[in-house]
Amino acid sequence: MTRSIINISTTAEDHHIAKLTALAIGLHILEAIMPSPLPGVKPGITNIVTLFVLYEYGFATAAWVSLLRVFASSLLLGQFLSPTFVLSLSGAVFSLCALYVAQHLPKKYFSAITLSILAAFAHIAGQLIIVRLWLIPHTGVAYLIPIFALAALIFGVINGLITRKISTNNRLFKNKSLYDAI
Amino acid sequence: MQQRTPLKFNNKPLAGDQLVIIASFALVIVLFQQFWSFEHASKLKIRQGSKIVGTYDLDQTRELHIHGELGDSHIIINQGKVRFKQSSCNNQYCVHQGWLSLAGQVAICLPNQISLQLVGAKSTYDSLNY
Amino acid sequence: MRLLLIFTFVFLSGCNKPEPLYNTQSYIFGTLVDISIYGESEARAQAISDQIIRNFQDLHSRLHAWQPSELKAINQAFALGKTPVSIAPDIAAMINEATKLSMQSKGAFNPSIGGLIAAWGFHYDEFKPVKIDENKIKNLVTANPKMTDIVIEENKIYSNNPAVQLDFGGYAKGYALDIALKYLREQGVKHALVNIGGNIIALGKHGKQPWRVGIQHPRKPSAIATLDLDSGWAIGTSGDYQRYFKLHEKRYCHIINPATGYPVQGIQAVTVLIPPQMNAGTLSDVTSKPIFIAQPTTRAEAAKAMHVENFLVIESTDRILVSKALAKRMTWLDKDAATHATEIQ
């Protein structure tokens, strides 16, 4: 029996991305099994990873991490192609679109907090559009929209602050960054 | 590793961030005003004939017996909602109305001349056409 | 963040300033009368609403269909054949107006079928399922009481048809709204809202906002929609849910089709909105009946005959028709109803 060995050349950055994606998947699953006080209201902690990658590696990498996270987590949770998956995906795609535009905002005035809030709002907007068009095709859940928006604002600010904190630490330790430590 | 642009870091939101927070907050308020026009009632006003029997807090569990034209009406308040449990009338429409919880809702027992009216900080409407 | 949350609550709770709104309720016409007066001192508002209530009680006792009253005396004279009795001028005017509206509705609105209404047991404060007497109903329909059978000469009245029995159940509440509005205006009141058993007329505004009324959902304990009632406008609903009894799981409502003698089936509610005019209140009470009684295919026609542009027809929870004119004015509260509503005309 011969062993076939596939060699893929990887860079150190690939490894970082893989680790970060793994972290994002871990957080995604943690959030999925965490009980929520209100259905649909989640802190969106995976956004921290997406934002961090955006700041450190740029948009393309952040998009990869985010989408890989959605696909891999749904496969792991057995939700692939289920409504939950579609909601995750549309949320992720919408928030990536928001980030794509928002990354060009002048850094002097707009920090990760802004990006985090915009991403959070785009996330719920993407999910609500799917809910309205596909899952619950009437306006019966409309009264939940303000709650989602309030949650997006609160968690957007918190996640933005966390992202800044992590990035700061990352800069302080330069070569010994957070993702190397995990 | 690519050269990173050095960024200033402190915990205070930057000017643009503050703007975004304020704008988002305004959006949230507008959304609440838009979608939460059905306000949950906080108080219950009970009338017998033209007299107000009393105004009751809805956030409690309580049973009331109000004496009307024909006899007793049994009313239950249960944590934010209220209903006629029983009334001394033949048709029992008031009982069939079931639970009320939103500001502006009304249940009337005409034969016994007892009405329940839910009031909130702001009612969706001034009067009910039925 | 904490500050933001506090702001949210402050915004949501809204301001709680007391406003010069006087509200009183009483039971007249076998129903609930609710008067709101805005912008007057409490003492004056109370004095005015007390007078309105006295006027209503007076009208009610004069028009009572099954207790000794002026109307009852007229009905007794009608039953005896062509026996002229004297009649008060305001009641004569009321009968003339009702006759005109009855002709306009081709007899669908017919206040002379008191006999049928009594046969169905709706002539009691408390009504119970009646044993349906098919022969009696058939005879009452064949006797064909019509408003045009009534003759008023000078201040005497008689009927050419002894079967004519006046019942102003579908007229008096609306007429009372007109009386109330007239009195409020005479007294110089600028802003008021009067609700008699669901029929509402508006005067002025509720502060800076127009008066807003909710339209009851015929099967739920909540409003189906709201609309702003501008000064002088009146709204009325005929429904199968206000007065009815159930017999063998079938609902018999108080609105009787004069042509068949039977309560109307297959419709839950008709709401009409009437623009300002001399008898807006009366029209808000009367004009919903012909639409309620009409066949599903002739409802729009019936509305047109009564010159009603704003109407809402709820045949069932999933069949709701609303005229284009009214659709523009109302806001749905019941999302389910909103999705089932069809605009017509």
Image: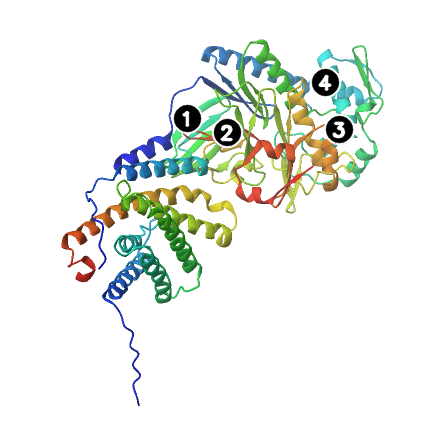
Residue A182 in view, yes or no: no
Per the image, the residue denoted by label 1 is B54
State if disc 3 and disc 1 touch (CB < 8 Å): no
Residue situated in front as seen by the camera: A77 or A127: A127
Dot 4: element: helix
* Residue C110 disc label: 3
* Residue C94 disc label: 4
State if disc 4 and disc 1 touch (CB < 8 Å): no
Q: Where is residue C208 in the image (x, y as percent from the top left)?
A: 48, 20
Per the image, the residue denoted by label 2 is B125
In this rendering, position of residue A160 left or right of residue B128: left
Q: Mark 4 and mark 3: span between their CA atoms?
A: 13 Å
Mark 4 or mark 3, earlier in chain: 4
Badge 1 and badge 4 in a common chain: no
> From the viewer's perspective, is the residue at label 1 or at label 2 nearer?
2
> From the viewer's perspective, is the residue at label 1 or at label 3 nearer?
3
Quarter of the image with the N terminus of chain C is: top left
Amino acid carrying mark 1 in the image = Gly
Tell me which residue sits at (72%, 37%) in the image: C299
Q: Mark 3 and mark 2: span between their CA atoms?
A: 33 Å
- Decide: is A131 above or below B83: below
Dot 3: element: loop
